[in-house]
Image: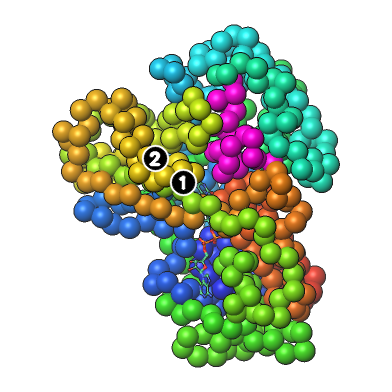
């Protein structure tokens, strides 16, 4: 049997391992840390369960990650292990309104004037058209702003679209690539022009739904662990052994193993440290990070519901994302207490962001400080490279490398979706290459 080694137990490594297992292989996962999950995990802190920042599993119907979860576990995986978010509530200039899921809700999207709502509708239709008709290469080097600015004369609409850009691409609308922005809207196949028009009269939901794992983010790697992989924790791969331009094994901080296939899910920019023979591309931009402030309150004082509250800034900065995790799963905080999370992209001085988070928390939950018993700041990598419009998507490294048997996966190898969706997307395409190169046949 072929020996397959996976470097890293983050969501990319776990997705690939599960797909390889389905093909009849027994992959071995190596993780340098003492726990699995990479950026998809949670810690226990003073009685609260804190995730590595606010997370939702997006694109519940057509996204690669939900698709993979259904394929590997059961079709009912979402009803069994996840809880569905109700809405995204956007806040701008003291007004708030849920993000429209159908045309009827569009008419009530009160954070915008009626004229701006109409402009937003036109903008969505134009992005749908360009996103569905064009491949990524046709949208070459275009910033989201260049394409959308004719609709964005109204400042509030600009601020809203800027917030959507930060949320979907990790950068502002002026830096973000149109490919990725368009993809966010255009890839949801239910969200089409005809669907929108059909949904004028009936109560329909044009969005696919976002999900939170019951028990916290750590439950997702736990679910994968139930597939009984051989996992070596605390074992770092120091060198990928290559003979005649072909993978022959790996060397760790503990010992050496034979391998025919090695899949690397760490940062591609760091691959040269363990495989100097790699001659492929490196991402142009570095990773970007997100910052989260966790607040534990000794009493339930905020009524956010099972929603994400997005506080739009009226400058060009990243919005603040608030969630009451206790509404999603009351076991994440001690009984009768409340766990609030606030995340944003780490795009400016950390202390300025934290000050803003606390001031905004004070507006949404007056006197929250009286009930505050736990506060924790977390900073983690959101994606391994920031894809701006001048860092074209097709300049990402190829997942099949110049070395036979060495493949790459993760958020710096894939252009579409974001976070977990990208990880699963990269896992699927990696498996396609391996299937062709090694003629794997078994599919279950
Ligand atoms: C605050 C925040 C909010 C987010 N929100 C969302 C969200 O709502 N939805 C979403 O889908 N995504 C979200 N993300 C993004 C998501 O968490 C990441 O994109 C995803 O977890 C990346 O997974 P990965 O497996 O590619 O990489 P990682 O999680 O970084 O895993 C790579 C693993 O490889 C290991 N490794 C590296 N080199 C070696 C080596 N030489 N030997 C052994 N092990 C090695 C590392 O230790 C690590 O465990 C968010 C991220 C943050 C920080």
Please name the residue that numbered disc 1 is placed on.
Answer: 346
Q: Where does the image place residue 109, in percent across and percent down from the top left?
A: 53, 16
> How many neighbours does mark 1 have within 10 angstroms: few (below 14), some (14-19), or many (20 or more)?
some
Q: What residue is rendered at 79% in x and 32% in y?
A: 130
Q: Please give the range of residues in magenta.
A: 157-177
Q: Is residue 317 magenta?
A: no
Q: What residue is rendered at 61% in x and 16% in y?
A: 154
**262 and 24: which is toward the camera:** 262
Quarter holding the N terminus is bottom right
Question: In this rendering, would 396 be left or right of 254?
Answer: right
Discs 2, 1 touching: Cβ within 8 Å: yes
**216 and 396: which is toward the camera:** 396
Quarter holding the C terminus is bottom right
Disc 2 or 1, which lies upstream in sequence?
1
**36 and 86: which is toward the camera:** 36
Question: In this rendering, would 70 be left or right of 310?
Answer: right
Question: Residue 91 appears in which quarter of the rendering?
Answer: top left
Image: 186 above or below 121: below
Report the disc number at residue 353.
Answer: 2
């Amino acid at each position: 049997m072929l020996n397959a080694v996976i470097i890293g137990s983050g969501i990319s490594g776990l997705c690939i391992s599960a797909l390889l297992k389905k093909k009849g292989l027994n992959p071995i996962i190596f993780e340098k840390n003492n726990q699995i999950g990479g950026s998809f995990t949670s810690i226990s802190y003073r009685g609260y369960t804190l995730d590595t920042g606010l997370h939702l599993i997006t694109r519940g119907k057509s996204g690669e990650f939900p698709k993979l979860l259904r394929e590997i576990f059961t079709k009912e995986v979402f009803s069994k292990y996840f809880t569905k978010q109700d809405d995204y509530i956007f806040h701008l200039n003291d007004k708030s309104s849920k993000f429209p899921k159908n045309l009827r809700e569009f008419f009530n999207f009160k954070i915008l004037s009626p004229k701006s709502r109409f402009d937003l509708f036109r903008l969505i239709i134009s992005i749908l058209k360009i996103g569905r008709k064009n491949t990524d290469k046709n949208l070459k080097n275009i910033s989201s702003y260049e394409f959308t600015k004719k609709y964005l004369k109204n400042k509030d609409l600009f601020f809203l679209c800027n917030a959507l850009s930060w949320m979907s691409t990790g950068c502002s609308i002026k830096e973000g690539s149109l490919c990725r922005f368009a993809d966010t809207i255009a890839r949801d196949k239910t969200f089409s022009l005809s669907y929108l028009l059909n949904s004028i009269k009936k109560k329909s939901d044009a969005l696919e739904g976002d999900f939170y794992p019951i028990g916290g983010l750590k439950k997702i790697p736990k679910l994968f662990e139930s597939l009984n992989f051989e996992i070596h924790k605390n074992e770092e791969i120091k060198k990928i052994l290559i003979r005649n331009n072909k993978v022959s094994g790996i060397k760790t901080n503990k010992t050496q193993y034979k391998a025919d296939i090695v899949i690397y899910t760490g940062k591609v920019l760091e691959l040269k440290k363990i495989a100097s023979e790699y001659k492929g591309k490196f991402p142009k931009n570095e990773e970007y990070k997100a910052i989260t402030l966790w607040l534990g309150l000794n009493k339930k004082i905020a009524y956010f519901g099972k929603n994400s509250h997005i506080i739009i800034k009226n400058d060009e900065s990243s919005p603040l994302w608030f969630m009451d995790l206790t509404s999603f799963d009351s076991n994440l905080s001690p009984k009768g207490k409340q766990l609030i999370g606030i995340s944003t992209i780490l795009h400016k001085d950390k202390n300025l962001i934290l000050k803003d988070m606390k001031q905004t928390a004070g507006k949404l939950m007056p006197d929250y400080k009286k009930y505050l018993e736990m506060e924790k700041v977390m900073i983690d990598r959101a994606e391994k490279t920031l894809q701006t419009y001048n860092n074209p998507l097709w300049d990402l490294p190829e997942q099949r490398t110049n070395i036979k048997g060495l493949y790459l996966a993760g958020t710096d190898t894939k252009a579409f979706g974001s976070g977990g969706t990208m990880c699963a997307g990269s896992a699927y395409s990696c498996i396609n290459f391996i299937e062709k190169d090694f003629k794997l046949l078994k599919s279950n």
